[in-house]
Amino acid sequence: MNTNFAKQGKTYRDSLDVQLTSETIAGGSFEEFFRKYVAGTEAFPYEQILALAGLGLRTVERRKAVLGFTMEHDPNGLFLISTVDSEGPAAPAGLRAGDVIISWNGGEVPKRVERWLREQRAGDLLKLRVRREGKEISLEFRLGENKETVYEVIEISRAGEKARHIRQGMLRGETSAIPVR
């Protein structure tokens, strides 16, 4: 595509030219694939395709603690609350955009808040002392939770010789026939 389009200063027509280029390289039709999975709404059969190479798909749900607000470090060294998630744990505790954090769990704001947050669990208590309109206010709330679904490709240990051959070809970017026994 780089040769046929970018180097010639031409743009390509969405998925049509991607399809045509794929067909030219592979020497076969990708019409059904593009109709179903690119232009259509059918779910791609990952499990079925990965199984051909002796691979599986594992779904993992990860949970992580969330603050429920964002902040920025201003040029004067102050930590200023930028936004407060109305659905998060900080909003009902009374935290507002514009508040300035002066104390974090009785000490300084962590230098790397994201790292600090990774070490916490949902439900852990956070005590903040903030300055708002010249007054100091103490707030405390429990950290919220964000659930994230992650998909991991795993190797199936009982894969046959043909599947292992396909997997090695995928990893090396090579394809070749395997003798049938």
Image: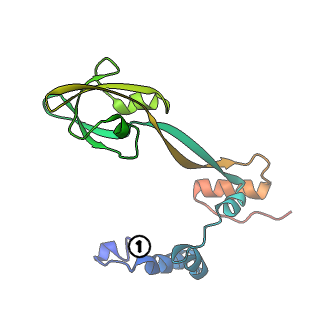
Is residue 110 visible in this depiction of the protein?
A: no
Q: Return the x and y of residue 38 as percentages of the image width and height.
A: 52, 74
Name which residue lies at 35% across and 21% down: 105
The residue identified by callout 1 is 1
Residue 10 horizontal side relative to residue 170, left or right: left
User: With respect to residue 42, does 85 lie above or below?
Assistant: above
Q: Return the x and y of residue 31 as percentages of the image width and height.
A: 57, 82
Q: Nearer the viewer, residue 27 or 70?
A: 70
Q: Return the x and y of residue 127 as percentages of the image width and height.
A: 35, 24
Secondary structure under tag 1 reads loop
Q: Nearer the viewer, residue 118 or 162?
A: 118
| Number of residues whose C-alpha sits closer than 10 Å to that of mark 1, classed few (under 14), some (14–19) or many (20 or more) | few
Looking at the rendered image, the quarter that the N terminus falls into is: bottom left
Residue 135 horizontal side relative to residue 150, left or right: left
User: With respect to residue 31, does 73 lie above or below?
Assistant: above
Q: How is the image coloured?
A: rainbow
Q: Return the x and y of residue 4 as percentages of the image width and height.
A: 38, 77
Is residue 173 visible in this depiction of the protein?
A: yes
Q: Nearer the viewer, residue 181 or 99?
A: 99
Q: Give the farthest residue toward the top.
A: 106
Residue 164 horizontal side relative to residue 41, left or right: right
Name which residue lies at 32% across and 17% down: 106
Q: Nearer the viewer, residue 78 or 13?
A: 78
Number of numbered callouts drawn: 1
Q: Can you tell which quarter of the image residue 97 is in?
A: top left
Looking at the rendered image, the quarter that the C terminus falls into is: bottom right
Name which residue lies at 80% across and 48% down: 158
Name which residue lies at 54% across and 79% down: 23
* Amino acid type at mark 1: Met
Q: Can you tell which quarter of the image residue 107 is in?
A: top left
